[in-house]
Structures are given as structure tokens and as C-alpha cells.
Amino acid sequence: MSRWLRLTRAGGLAVGAVAAGAGMVIAAEKIAVGRLRLRPDPAAGEPLGQLRGRPVTVLAGDGVPLHAEVAGPDDAPVTVVFTNGYTLTLDCWHYQRQALEGTARLVFWDQRGHGRSPRMWPDEDPAGAVSIEQTGADLAAVLAATCPGDGPVLLVGHSMGGMTIMALAAQQPELFGTRIIGTALIATAAANVDPAAWLPPLLRPLARQAAPSVLRTAAQGRQAVLVERGRQAAGDIAFLSTRIIGFGDSSVSPTLVDFAERMIRSTRVDVIAEFYLALLDHDQRAALDVIGRAPAFVLTGDRDKVVASRLAGELAAGIPGADLILVPGAGHLVFMERPEVVNEAILALLARSAAAGDVEPRTA
């Protein structure tokens, strides 16, 4: 047998083995996802992503038109402003909107580059326009546009949304304890955020080093188009990764996982890349005393793979008087996974903050 023929056959065997292995992995994924979808699904009938408020366009300081929505009575004594996290949209607050509408005036907004807020910053200098400090300034613009006057406001933020609130505290400390009468920080941290925390320990250093350059490359030119096509076709892989990374309970509703995955997939890869770098640079520990001027709580799931519960504990310890609420079995999307716990905590904070500020909250 010629050397060329032997090499050809060996190469064919190798390719066949790789193809067979890939096929087995894909088959295993389909089986796993199929089994998950056969489980009882309490969220199957929920109108996820369909609840709408009165739209408001908020111009950020650099001209980016931020999308916001207002729900509930305008004459409510307190306004609650919700800020979404990394790769999510304002629709993520579905269960909180249901629980609080009628109790307070509610404001939801999409962070720049997320949801209905467009990505509008210079391609040649994205790092100059993407930072947690910028999102803090964006939140200030949202407050000015949607909460006019001097009425009391309670802030709720998840993950990067919580960091946005901390940045606002650093920039406008005079608001806290006066207009801002309470703060709810969910699955977030003041510093030392590690977006690779969900990976096995041996892989984390490599991921931290490689991710910025890989994401930058993936977000450029034709690569971005190809990456986006791959993301749209990810299917079962995207479903499983969202379930594993975002949720703590393996029996979580498949409909809820699909909903979270669609929000993540709707976020452009260049936005993901640029905010990833912003998260690495985030450090708002100097602002924590300011947040403590009004009642506050820090809530986290003990199975959070994105922001370790240890960091949430450090955050709570840094805010004078803040409560730490640990939700057993819940992951990073705890406000979607255990909405009854989160809603109860927000309502309790609303009552406590209103009492501290001599504001009489409505009853649902």
C-alpha cells in the first residue's frame, strides 16, 4: 500500500472519528434538551416579553436615545426604577412588573446597546463610550426624564444594573437619602467581577486572558456577521448553556430558559465584547457609603455562577445597614427563577423606605 494511500485512509479515519464524536455530542444535547422540555412547565402560559408600558425616549448625555417604559399610576407616591443587567433587556423584569404594578409607579429602561436602546458610539473608540461610569450617567438621564419633580424613587438593579446604580451613587451622592429612598441590588458586586467565574478553575486564567482579544476579533467586520449567524443557529447548545450558567435549579421552566436565551441572543456580539471589558474594570467600592444613606438590600442566589455569593456578601458588608438575602438553590437570574422571594424583598424595602421617608405606599 502506498504511503499516500495510507495517509489518506488515516486522515479519513480521523475525520470520521471527529464527525462521529461531534454527532454524539449533538445527539446527547438534543436528548438532554428534549428531556428538559418534557418536564412540567409552570411558565408555559406566561406572556413573557409581551408586557408593555408607556414608551419614553431618553437622550443620554452623548446623544444615545435610551428606550424606557413607564407603567402604573402617575400619582403613585413612589416610583420604582428597574435597571437590567448585562445582555438582558427591560423585559427581564416580567414578574416584578406583575407584582408591583398598582403598588407604585414603575420605570423600566434598556441599557445602551441592549434591547430597544441602540448601539450608538464611535467604532474607532468603543472603550471611550462603554463603561460602568457611562451607564451611571445614563441612569441619571433616565431619572431626570421619567421621574420629574422631587418625588421619592426606589432603585432596583440586577448584575450590571446594580453596578450602574453604584456608579450613579458615586456621581450624584446628593440623591441618596433624599430623592432616592431605597436601593435593591440583585446578583451584583462592587468590584472583582469575573465573567469567567462559571468555568472550571483550571480554565479561568486562560479565559480571562484570551476573552478580550477573542471578543474584539469576533465583533469586527465579517467575523461579526459569521458569529451572529452561529449564535442564531446555536439552538440546543444555547439553551443548555443558558440553563447551566443563568439558573441554579436544574428543573427550572424551559419556557423561562428560552426567554432568557432570546434576550441574550438579541444582544449584538460587539456590545457583549465592549461591556465585557467594562465589567473587568468595574470598581465602585468608594460609593457604598452613599448607598447606605437610605435602606438597602443585597440579594443573591447561592448557586450564582456569574457573580459569586461571596462578592455579594462583601457588597452588603460595605453598605451601612444593608441586609443580605441569600436565596438557596437559585442562580444568577434569581429574580426570574425565584420571583416570589425577590418580589417580597422589594415590597418590604418599599414599605421600609416609605416609612423612613414619611411616604405612604399604596396597597396592591
Image: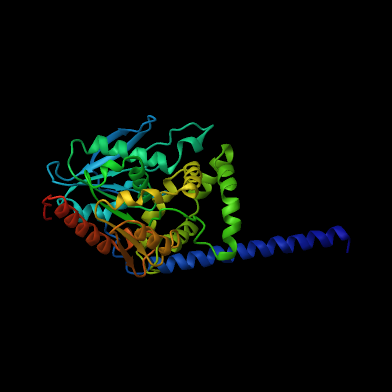
Displayed quadrant of residue 352: bottom left
Taking depth in this image into account, of 89 and 328 the one nearest to the observer is 328
Q: How many marks?
A: 0
x then y, percent, for residue 70: 22, 42
x then y, percent, for residue 300: 35, 62
Q: Residue at x 47, y 68 (%)?
A: 32
Taking depth in this image into account, of 125 and 24 the one nearest to the observer is 125
> Which residue is most to the top?
63
Q: Quadrant of the N terminus?
A: bottom right
- 30 on left or right of 342: right
Taking depth in this image into account, of 351 and 301 the one nearest to the observer is 351
Displayed quadrant of residue 178: top left
Q: How is the image coloured?
A: rainbow
Q: Residue at x 33, y 45 (%)?
A: 169
Q: Residue at x 22, y 61 (%)?
A: 344
x then y, percent, for residue 201: 56, 65
Q: Is residue 113 visible?
A: no
Q: Is residue 293 visible?
A: yes
x then y, percent, for residue 184: 29, 54
Displayed quadrant of residue 306: bottom left
Q: Quadrant of the C terminus?
A: bottom left
